[in-house]
Each structure stands twice: as C-alpha cells, then as structure tokens.
Image (cartoon, rainbow, N blue to C red):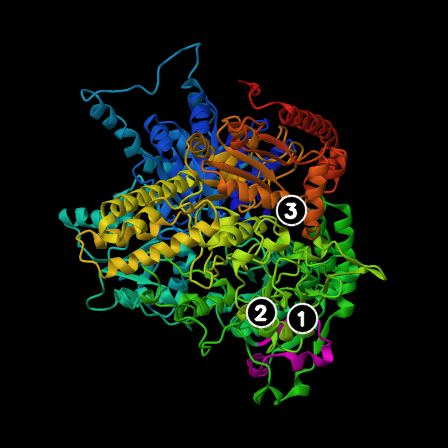
C-alpha cells in the first residue's frame, strides 16, 4: 500500500536536491544556471548538519569547474562512495570525458541535469535538450522528467536503477521550465526512499571500490588486440538496463502510488495521430490531447521516459497499433543531420518493426522549444493538424515564423484547452531585484500549503540579475496542472504592475481576462490615476470591464524603512483583493514567509517587512472606473511610449526592424530572415532601450561644482557625463540646459562645460552623489550633485541630454588623459548597460573604453560582464563619431584568456604580414610612407592617430595601384594600427574555471591587458563561492562561511617577474585606478589588473559602494599596489604600495556587510574564529607587501 506523503510546494531543483542529498555521500558541485540551486540546497542542508539516509552528513565540495567536479565524482565513486552532481549546458560538456570513463567502468551514479541550450552563435541560459543529446554516446542512461513531481520521483528511480544495473544515469529535466517551476508535489519520505534502495546493491558497490586491502588496477591502456572485445563486453549490462529501470518504476509505483513506464501513452485507444516527445512539453501535449479526445479526435501522446538505452520493444508496445501518422518532436537542433536524435531513433525502431511485418506509419520530425521558446496547446494542435494532411511535411518547426526555409507550421494563437480555462491565473510585472519574483514564489507556497488548491508558478526574466523586466505567471485550481507554458493572452483574472513606468512601455493587459483585476503601483493619488494612464490602457480597462486598484507602494516602503523593496507590500495587496484566503489568514501566512525568507539575514529586515505589511491595506484604493466612462475612448496626450519610435529617421534600420520589437516584448514574432545568420550584432543599441527605472535622478548644481569629474567616474551606467564645448555651440540649447565656463586653464578661453544626466538611462543608484566631495557651506546636505524625483525632470532632461549628445566632441589631443577631470571629458564607448544599479564592475570597463576604446579588441569571459556587455537586444559597447569602438566577443567561461591570446597573436601576425608587404612594395608606395608605416611609434594615442592617417593614405594609393599585391596589402592594411587587446572577466573565471589558461597566458610574453572584475563571488549565477571569496563570508556553496582565505591572485602573478600587476579600487583611490589603466596598457607584455568590484551579493545598499571600497582598503582587506617590471629593468624596485597601513580593524569592514554579518547569527563561534583569522591574514598580507615595497629590485623575491 502506498505510503502517506506530505504535500510540499517547491521548485523542480529543490525537489531533485532533496532526493540527491538523501541518497549520496559526496556531492561535487560547480555553479551553472539553471542547475546551481540544487547545489545551493545541498550546501545549506549540510551546513545545518542535516543527515542523509544513513545518518551521515554528505560532504559537499565545490570545485573549480564542472570538469573538476566530474573528476572528483569519478574518484569518489571508484573508491566506493555514493556520489552525485548537478549541472547543465557547457558544464555538462566539460563532464563528458569523465562520463565516458565512469560508464565504461560500469560505475553506478546519477547526474542531475537542468537541461539547457548550448552556446553556438550565441549563449543562452534557457532550456532545451541540446546538452543531454551531446551525451548520447557516453554510455550513460538518459532519463527524462517532465515536471517537478516527476523530477523528484525519477531522481529516486534513477538511483535505484543505477545501483541495480551499474549503468550511470543522466537524469534530466528542462531548465527553467521544470527546474524553476514552483508547484505542489507529493513529497517522498525517508522510509519510501530507503525501501527503494537495496542495501545489498550498495554493499556491492562498496565492495568494488579501490582498496589496498584487495587491490586491483583500473583504467588501463589497451591495444588493438583486446580493446574492441572489451568494449563489447559491457553489452549485457546495457541490454538489461531498460528492464531494470522498469522494475524500479514498478517498485516505486507500489511504494508511492505513482506509476510510470519507459514510454507512457496518453490519448485515444484507437489514435491515428500521435506525437512522441520527452520533457516538459509532453505535459502540454497531454493537456491538449485530453481536450481534443473529448471532442472525438483520435489523437495521443507518447511520453519518452528512458531515452538511453533506447528500448524499441517498449516503444512499440506503448504505441497504439492504429497510429498511421506520428510526429516526433525534438527540443534540440543538429545542423546537417537528416533528422534530430529522437526522431531518428523512433524511425529506426518503426522501420525495423516494419521489416518484420508491422505496418509502417508515416513519421515526421519537428523541432520546438529551443532556448525555452514557448510551446503552447495551439502549437500542439498545429502539429496534429499537420499529421492530418494527406502529405505532411517530413521536417518542420513549430513556435517560430520561418520565412527563410519555410519549415514552420502556422498555429492558432487563440486556441485554449478546457483544462486551462478551469484554472485561475495571475500575472505580475516587476523589475529584477525588486523582490516581485521572490514574493510570488512565497505566494505559491502559501496557496499550496494553506489550501487544497494545486498551484504552479513560472517566472520570466532575461539574463540580467536586476533592472530587467520580470513577469511572474501564477496558476491555481483544484485539479492537476499540466500547463507547462506561460499564461496566454486573455486568461489572467489578476494582473499587477509593480513598476509605474511599465504602463508607458508594455502591453500589460494583453493577459487580462474580462471582468478581472488590474493592480497598479503608482505614485499618483488614486483620484488622478486615470488621468496618467495611456489611452490604450484605458480602453482595455473599460472594454474588459476590469477593476482598477492603485497603491503607492514606494511611499509605503519608504514609510516602513524598506527603501525600494515593495515585494511584500504588493503581495499583501494581491491576497487582499483576490480573496483567495481570508485577509487575516493571508497576512499571517505572508509574515511567516517573510520570516522564513529573511530571518537568517537580518531580524531588522523581518521587522521592517512586518511594518510594511501592516501599513499596506490603508494605502490600497480602488479607482472608480465607471466615473470615467467613455473618457478612454477619445485621444489622449498620453500614449504608449517604447522609448524609440519607428518613424524616427535617426533610428537605424537594424534597430527599427529588429531591436525595437525585442524591446517591446515582440521578439517571438520576429521571422527567421530578420535575424543575423552568424550571431553578429551592431554596437550601440543600448542607447535606444530607455528603461526609465530610476525613481530619482541626479541634478547638477553648477554654482557648487569644482568640475572634478568624480561623479562621472563612478557612474555605473554612464548616465552622467561631462563635455567641453564652445559657448557658441550652446547658443541653441534648451532653456533648462546647464553649462558654465570651464575652470581648467588648459582649454581655450570661452570654453564651457556641462555635467548632464541621461534621465531615461539612469538607474537612480545615487553613487554620483555619494562620490561628490563638495558640500554647500550653508546647507551641508546639498552637494554639487543631488538626487531629485524623476517625474518633473524626465522630459526637460531628455531634451537636454539629446542636445548634449549632439555637441561636437572636443579635441581629445587637448585633454589631459591622466587626470580624473580630464579623462572624464573623453567620450565613453560603453554606456547604459543592464548591470545592477550601483554595480561596481562597470566603471572599470567604461574607463578602459574612454582611454583606449577606439582601438580595443575585447575577449570577455562568460559572467556578469558578458551578460550586461552582450545580452540582446541592448549592446552597451558603442562607437565614436568616426564609427570606431571596441570590437567585442565572448567565447566560453573557461577559455577566455586563451581566446584573448588568440586575438593578440592574430593582431601581431597580421601586422607583421602587412609590414612585410609594405616593405616589399616600398618603392611602389613611396619609401617614406612605407618606412613610416613600418616603424610607427604607437605607444601613445597621438602616434595611433598619426598611423591612422598614414593607413588612410596607404589605402588611397592602393586603390589606384596596379601592383599585383595591392589588394593583398589593402586587405590587411588596418592591422598596421596597433590593437589594444583586453581580456575581461570575473573572479569565477580568473580564480577558478579559467585559472589554468590565465596562468599560462601570464607566463607568456605577449601584450595582453587582463582585467579581473573581482566581486569575490560568482555574481552572475547568483552569488556562489569562488577562490576569491574571503574567509568568513557567507555565500551560496558556503552557507557555513568560507573556511579558507582568499586566493592572492595578484601576488601570484607578480611572482613571474615579467607581468605588470596591480590591484585597484576606484572608490578608494580613483587616481591610482586611472594611473594603473594607463600603465598597464602601455606595458608591452602581459598586464593584470585585479579590480575590487562591489556587488549586490555583498549585502549592503549599493549607494554606499565607494564607502565600502574605502573601508576594504583602510581595513587591509584590499591593499592597493602596482608591480611594474619596467622599474626593475631600470634598476629600481618594481613593487609600489599605493595604500597606507590599515587604519581600521577588519571587523569594521566585515560587520558592515551582510555576507559576513549573517554568519554571526547562524554560526556565531565560527564567525568569531574566522574574524580573528581574517584580521591575522590582513596584517600578515600587508606586512608582506610592505616588505616587498622596501626591497630593492635585485634582491630575491619570496620563494625564489
């Protein structure tokens, strides 16, 4: 009889992690989206001392890469432990060599994969099955789960089967769509898990372990005489495995009451048309099949559970013999193949059966859902409709509009199933990092655990961690929810907009169902809200008869001391309006969720949330829509404003036709022909995004300003700028445009300066104000830059910024690049990125582009800097007036140093080749020109400008030349201009996964500039520990605090002797940072800049970014130094210490950041121990640096 089980509301990753943790002893992990949270759960449970099934706490070990994790697993497994890991995408590819070995050695284990697309023409963090399909030949079994419930169940079934059959299992489920789906599941208890695992099989695994007590040799090198036979020797194990999996499924059914088959069929018993697929899409097909069968259609779906080893007999047994037309859907693409993997396997199975007399149905193959592309019931019906055609297409796609190769099927976007209409739907529009997603996850858990309703949640966001639009999709109802797709238009009874600016940007009410509710967060008083709404929104509210509710959530948050966090306020509104739970019960449940979510971080944060919740309902108002009857049907001065209008002649065609639709949320509608074939995109598209997310923006006060440029230097989004221009150039300025005479004595008389904000691109972080050193003596709270509400400023400042941009660029040669005021007058070629408000990384990148951008080649490691640097459609790298700018590319996470080295080698080789050709053609070109081109001094910008002039002259002469090698030289002439190669990445890349390559590149003599943006965690994947994480910091994968010291990357690099090395922190010493960038770029060898980069993962308001950098330096946590080999060559000491001895205890720094402070609450003894160790380490490190600064260059370095 099935055991009684508890109902839990959780996401697919947590469901899997619960089983993996219970059934393993060693868990080797490495962060990668969307699999990271499985490792995070395991680490958190281990830090709490939670035991596994056998009473031991599993050993959680974070490695430097997925390859390292796989090697660790292999070692643990071959030594008799039960071990597992979690991964996805490129990480899974790095494990493949070990998977071949583990499978070849018939070693049981389960690898859990949140399946994600592979990087090809572009990276994508979203889900499909490209990665697991790359593992088909490893010898591992492939088991597919379709939902969080199945993901939990199959995690256990896989563990039981692998022990019984000795075939390792890759248990996979669709990334994001299943891994992050929050739903209500029947949780497996420890007794059920224990009953599934045969103790004798575990003992047998241990008996096969390597042991000196009964030694064997494993991993031999074999010759042609026996390798082939040895490879075939494992056949019986693979042949038997499908039945072993089925046996495990049957046993599971007895214990848990949920029954699975290797191939599960759902539909009409006499179905004529059948779809075959695996993964979450199968549930959408299931829902659609039930709808169509109820209407008499003979259709069905075959869900593939075990894909490898493929079991043709089981497939044929499950397939209705009446099936005459079959569509096999693959969630991957294999270019050049005559069909995708599952399609070819099904065709082969059917063809072999036909050879033995079974009727061969028509089989067609389709691709769907790549990179989480939507797969809806309307698309499912389109596939069934295609199968009904007399001659259906053999190959097709569904879910896109292919106007190029014409493979796509049309579908009815208005098709809805009965099951979906029986559910309640709610949609919430939020902004990344505003708490909307976390609040909605809590809402689902409240609904799932406080009611008998089934609940489900999907959360849509792009790769940005914050500042991007998020849309939460919540469903709930009495029956099982199989809708593995986003809520469709016209279905949501409740829509909430948590950001007021969205009403001007997006079609918020497309999801709204008639007679539903629209909740708006707005600073406008309830009686005037209607007057501020765009005409299209008003019309939708009236036509759909929607209730309109309004609240000024930011005012409530401010009153409660919550800053900009409005999530629990809006959550309270949802429960109050919807009435799903009694109001008092809902508020108690919300407060319990707050305590669970934030209790470990800060007791004060919990109290502030409580206060905000209690203040909310008094500020929630229903707007009387009826009073405005008819008002919305007439033109209004307010209309939807996307930031860019199609009829703007200044907008490039590419932006108008491609970028703009993506900004407006219509990217799904773009046809195939509109997209670049090779993933190449233009620069400078971020300027068209105009996110308008700031509540306040900086206002410049010229009467106080000393024109120091610090506000420009620290701005994370290049949203405040300075420029010089003649007084005459400002004669046609808008009336509110501020400018004053420049104070610099180095510019011509009559030169004016302006500090101008980009109001629609500013994120309102306030860093510029904090950096401003000037205070009004009569009002010390007033500075030369002050924050003010954006409302009345947006329109005039938009005009001012447009005018500012059209001012002619000042002659760069007359500006002092080596000073802060001067360098900040240089036009930035990195602007308006999608980085978090207050980001500590972006100012370094912007600085590099101001100084060297027109000649930069950038190799960017995957991570935060590649996402805000190259996440479509907003590309922040841009060009100058001459059309020059940084040429940027991202290869992989692990190979960025090598990738950048390749750029350097190519640049040097092509320059040398061009010089060779110029030398050969010297007489033809003119000896003086050829000599000047070959021997040009390009150490400074002036020399590069001169060389550009020579190259232009060269190309002019070559265009009229009849010399046989003229075209050859013309093709490489631009490479005579020296390139500045920059290798950029975060600490996860530089300290961990890419360190081997980084170290190798540093060991070579080539001229590359390496910028490490050190946030001391894996920021982009959510804040996991790296070897840059300091001792005592709490991060994901170090829930109990990091027990070891931070790796001293800069000092390790300096030990080579020939590498220019520096540590910088712009908020602590901006002049040193500027000097370092100049010195590093000028050095004709490898240079390494390790840049302290504050991050939201540190746990403080990013308004205090600079303060924390100063504290990091003053406490000795981050000493500033430069190591310049040129000084040693001149007989001096290459090491220069740029920061004073620590003047603050390390405790002051650590207690000011939540990442350290929270350990004192969760592990107080460890916190004190780590604090003492951190203080000792800081003192010892500074003493070592001090000694190096005093040592003469010819004395031996430490360790020599």
Query: In the displayed structure, would residue 934 be above or below residue 511?
Result: above
Q: Position of residue 856 (x, y in %)?
A: 44, 50
Q: Position of residue 413 (x, y in %)?
A: 41, 71
Q: CA distance from mark 3 to mark 2?
A: 26 Å
Q: Are marks 1 and 2 in contact (CB under 8 Å)?
A: no
- Crowding at dot 1, Cα within 10 Å, few <14 / some 14-19 / many 20+, comes out as some
Q: CA distance from mark 1 to mark 3?
A: 26 Å
Q: Which residue is mark 1?
A: 738
Q: Badge 2: how crowded within 10 Å, few (<14), some, or many (20+)?
A: many
Q: Which mark is residue 839?
A: none
As drawn, the label of residue 804 is 2
Mark 3 surroundings within 10 Å by alpha-carbon count, few (fewer than 14), some (14 through 19), many (20 or more): some
Tell me the residue at 54%/44% (across/down).
1078
Name which of mark 3 and mark 2 comes first in the sequence: 2
> Quick one: 1002 or 250, which is closer to the camera?
1002
**Which residue is pictured at 49% across the width and 37% down the height?**
1087
Where is residue 172? Give x, y as percent: 42, 44
Q: Magenta segment, which residues?
A: 515-544
SS class of the residue under badge 2?
A: helix
- The one nearer the camera, 111 or 19, is 111
Q: Quadrant of residue 513?
A: bottom right
For label 1, the SS is loop
According to the picture, the residue beneath numbered tag 3 turns out to be 1070
Residue at x 22% of width, y 20% of height: 223
Q: Residue furthest top?
A: 213
Q: Residue 904 in the image: state x and y as whole percent.
A: 38, 42
């Amino acid at each position: 009889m099935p055991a009684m089980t508890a109902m839990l509301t959780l996401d697919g990753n947590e469901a899997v992690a619960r089983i993996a943790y219970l059934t393993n002893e060693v868990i080797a992990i490495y962060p990668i989206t969307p699999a990271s949270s499985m490792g995070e759960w395991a680490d958190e449970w281990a830090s709490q001392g939670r035991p596994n099934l056998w009473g031991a706490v599993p050993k959680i070990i974070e490695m430097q890469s997925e390859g390292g994790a796989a090697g660790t697993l292999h070692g643990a497994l071959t030594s008799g432990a039960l071990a597992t890991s979690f991964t996805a995408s490129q990480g899974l590819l790095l494990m493949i060599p070990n998977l071949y070995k583990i499978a070849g050695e018939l070693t049981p284990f389960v690898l859990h994969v949140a399946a994600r697309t592979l990087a090809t023409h572009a990276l994508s963090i979203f889900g499909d099955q490209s990665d697991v399909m790359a593992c088909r030949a490893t010898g591992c079994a492939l088991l597919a789960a379709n939902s969080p419930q199945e993901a939990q169940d199959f995690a256990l079934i896989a563990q039981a089967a692998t022990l019984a059959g000795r075939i390792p299992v890759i248990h996979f489920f669709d990334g994001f769509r299943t891994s992050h789906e929050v739903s209500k599941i029947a949780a497996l208890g420890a007794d059920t898990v224990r009953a599934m695992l045969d103790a004798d099989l575990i003992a047998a695994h241990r008996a096969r372990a390597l042991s000196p007590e009964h030694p064997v040799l494993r991993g031999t090198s074999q010759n042609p005489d026996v390798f082939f036979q040895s490879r075939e020797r494992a056949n019986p194990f693979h042949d038997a495995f499908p039945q072993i999996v089925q046996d495990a499924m049957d046993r599971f059914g007895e214990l848990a009451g949920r029954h699975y088959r290797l191939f599960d069929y759902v539909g009409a018993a006499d179905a004529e048309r059948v779809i075959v697929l695996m993964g979450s899409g199968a549930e959408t097909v299931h829902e659609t099949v039930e709808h169509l069968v109820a209407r008499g259609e003979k259709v069905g779906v075959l869900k593939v559970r075990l894909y490898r080893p493929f079991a043709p007999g089981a497939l044929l047994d499950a397939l209705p013999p009446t099936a005459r037309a079959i569509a096999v859907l693959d969630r991957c693409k294999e270019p050049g193949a005559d069909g995708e993997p599952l399609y070819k396997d099904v065709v082969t199975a059917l063809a072999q059966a036909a050879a033995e007399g079974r009727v061969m149905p028509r089989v067609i193959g389709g691709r769907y859902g790549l990179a989480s592309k939507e797969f809806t019931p309307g698309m499912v019906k389109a596939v069934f409709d295609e199968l009904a055609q007399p001659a259906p297409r053999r190959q097709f796609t569904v879910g896109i509009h292919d106007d190029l190769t014409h493979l796509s099927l049309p579908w009815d976007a208005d098709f809805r199933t009965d099951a979906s209409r029986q559910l309640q739907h709610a949609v919430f529009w939020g902004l990344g990092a505003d708490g909307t997603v976390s609040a909605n996850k809590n809402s689902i858990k409240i609904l799932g655990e406080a009611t008998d309703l089934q609940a489900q949640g999907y959360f849509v966001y792009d790769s940005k961690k914050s500042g991007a639009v998020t849309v939460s999709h919540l469903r709930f109802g009495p029956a099982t929810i199989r809708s593995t797709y986003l809520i469709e238009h016209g279905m949501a009874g409740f829509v909430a907009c948590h950001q007021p600016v969205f009403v001007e940007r997006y079609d918020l009410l497309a999801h709204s169902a008639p007679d539903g509710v629209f909740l708006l967060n707005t600073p406008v008083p309830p009686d005037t809200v209607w007057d501020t709404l765009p005409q299209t929104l008003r019309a939708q509210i009236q036509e759909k008869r929607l209730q309109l509710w309004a609240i000024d959530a930011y005012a409530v948050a401010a009153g409660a001391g919550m800053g900009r966090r409005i999530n629990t306020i809006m959550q309270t509104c949802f429960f109050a309006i919807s009435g799903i739970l009694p109001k008092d019960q809902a508020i108690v449940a919300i407060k319990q969720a707050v305590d669970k979510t934030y209790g470990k971080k800060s007791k004060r944060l919990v109290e502030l949330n409580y206060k905000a919740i209690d203040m909310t309902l008094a500020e929630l108002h229903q707007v009387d829509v009826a009073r405005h009857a008819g008002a919305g049907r007439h033109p209004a001065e307010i209309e939807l404003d996307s930031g860019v209008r199609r009829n703007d002649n200044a907008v490039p065609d590419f932006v108008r036709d491609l970028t703009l639709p993506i900004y407006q949320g219509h990217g799904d509608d773009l046809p195939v022909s509109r997209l670049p074939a090779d993933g190449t995109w233009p620069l400078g598209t971020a300027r068209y995004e105009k996110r308008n997310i700031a509540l306040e923006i900086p206002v410049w006060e010229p009467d106080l300003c000393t024109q120091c440029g610090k506000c420009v230097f620290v701005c994370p989004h290049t949203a405040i700028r300075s420029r010089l221009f003649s007084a005459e150039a400002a004669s046609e300025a808008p009336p509110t445009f501020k400018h004053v005479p420049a104070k610099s004595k180095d510019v011509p008389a009559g030169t004016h300066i302006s500090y101008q904000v980009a109001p629609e691109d500013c994120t309102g972080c306030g860093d510029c104000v904090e950096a401003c050193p000037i205070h009004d003596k009569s009002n010390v709270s007033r500075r030369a830059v002050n924050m003010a509400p954006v409302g009345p400023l947006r329109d005039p400042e938009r005009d001012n910024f447009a005018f500012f941009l059209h001012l002619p660029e000042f002659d760069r040669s007359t500006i002092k690049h080596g000073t802060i005021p001067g360098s900040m007058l240089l036009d930035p070629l990195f602007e308006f990125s999608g980085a978090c408000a207050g980001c500590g990384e972006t100012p370094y990148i912007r600085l590099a582009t101001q100084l060297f951008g027109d000649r930069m080649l950038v190799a960017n490691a995957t991570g935060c800097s590649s996402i805000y640097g190259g996440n479509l459609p907003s590309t922040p790298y841009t060009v100058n007036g001459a059309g020059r700018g940084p040429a940027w590319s991202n290869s992989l996470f692990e190979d960025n140093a090598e990738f950048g080295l390749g750029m350097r080698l190519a640049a040097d080789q092509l320059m040398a080749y061009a010089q060779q050709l110029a030398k050969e053609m010297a007489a033809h070109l003119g000896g003086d020109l050829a000599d000047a081109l070959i021997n040009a001094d390009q150490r400074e910008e002036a020399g590069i400008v001169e060389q550009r002039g020579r190259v232009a002259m060269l190309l002019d002469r070559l265009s009229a030349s009849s010399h046989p090698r003229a075209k050859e030289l013309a093709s490489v002439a631009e490479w005579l201009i020296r390139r500045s190669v920059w290798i950029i990445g975060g600490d996860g890349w530089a300290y961990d996964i890419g360190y081997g390559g980084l170290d190798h590149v540093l060991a070579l003599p080539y001229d590359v500039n390496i910028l490490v943006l050190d946030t001391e965690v894996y920021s982009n994947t959510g804040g996991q520990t790296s070897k840059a994480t300091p001792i005592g910091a709490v991060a994901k994968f170090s829930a109990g605090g990091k027990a070891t010291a931070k790796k001293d990357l800069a000092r390790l690099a300096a030990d080579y002797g020939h590498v220019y090395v520096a540590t910088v922190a712009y908020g602590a010493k901006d002049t040193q940072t500027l000097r370092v960038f100049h010195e590093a770029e000028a050095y004709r060898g490898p240079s390494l800049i390790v840049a302290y980069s504050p991050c939201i993962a540190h746990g403080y308001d990013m308004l205090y970014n600079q303060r924390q950098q100063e504290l990091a330096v003053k406490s000795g946590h981050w000493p500033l130094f430069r190591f310049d080999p040129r000084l040693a060559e001149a007989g001096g000491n290459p090491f220069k210490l740029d920061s004073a001895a620590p003047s603050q205890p390390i405790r002051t720094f650590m207690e000011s950041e939540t990442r350290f402070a929270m350990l004192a609450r969760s592990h107080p003894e460890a916190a004190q121990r780590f604090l003492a160790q951190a203080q000792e380490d800081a003192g010892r490190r500074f003493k070592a640096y001090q000694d190096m600064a005093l040592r003469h260059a010819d004395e031996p370095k430490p360790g020599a």
